Image (cartoon, rainbow, N blue to C red):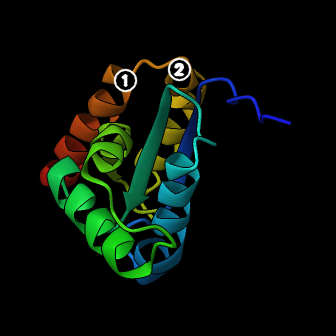
């Protein structure tokens, strides 16, 4: 019996700049993507205290996948998986960023990635002002 691909959705990984995400969560999500068990359209948003941008987050994710995934990294599948990855520097102890992450969740599930980029810019501007 074939498993149907789930509807498009967004997943926020809190603490995404840490070791648990690099060693366990991101490789497991890549394995799901490798096996065709993630939606065709999804947003996987990493959120954490680390000052990463999307490219840094994808590099960390790739390193974790190469070391800890059950599947050997396949360049084509990696590119498809990595397209859904983005990162928002929004520490949970920053009261200004948390409500914005929560507010955009329903929007992100519809595939509107621009809203995530807006949240990242707003959080970074807030942090720079003090």
Q: Residue at x 40, y 62 (%)?
A: 91
Residue 58: x and y in percent read 25, 56
Q: Is residue 113 visible?
A: yes
Judge from the rendering whether residue 10 lies leftward or rightward of residue 83; answer left or right.
Answer: right
Give coordinates of residue 114: x percent, y percent.
31, 21
* Image quarter of residue 110: top right
Residue 16 % position (x, y): 42, 65
Work out whether 116 lies above or below 14.
Answer: above
For label 2, count other residues whose C-alpha is less than 10 Å away and answer few (under 14), some (14-19) or many (20+): some
Label 1, label 2: how far apart the Cα atoms are? 7 Å
Residue at position x 53%, y 76% in the image: 24
91 sits left or right of 59 in the view: right
The answer to whether residue 96 of the structure is visible from this angle is no
Q: Residue at 56% x, 44% y: name it.
A: 11
- Check disc 2 and report the residue beneath it: 107
Residue 17 percent across, percent down from the top left: 35, 70
Q: Which residue is mark 1?
A: 115
Q: Which quadrant does the C terminus fall into?
A: bottom left
Residue that protrudes farthest toward the right in the picture = 1
Helix, strand or loop at label 1? It is helix
């Amino acid at each position: 019996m074939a498993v149907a691909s789930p509807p498009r959705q967004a997943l926020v990984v809190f603490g995404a700049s840490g070791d648990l995400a690099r060693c366990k969560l991101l490789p497991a999500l890549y394995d799901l993507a490798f096996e065709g068990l993630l939606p065709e359209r999804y947003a996987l948003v990493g959120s954490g205290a680390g000052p990463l941008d999307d490219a840094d987050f994808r590099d960390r994710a790739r390193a974790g996948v190469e070391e800890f995934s059950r599947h050997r990294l396949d360049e084509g599948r990696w590119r498809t998986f990595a397209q859904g990855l983005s990162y928002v520097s929004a520490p949970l102890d920053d009261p200004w960023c948390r409500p914005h992450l929560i507010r955009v969740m329903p929007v992100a599930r519809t595939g509107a990635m621009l809203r995530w980029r807006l949240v990242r810019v707003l959080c970074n501007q807030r942090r720079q002002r003090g």
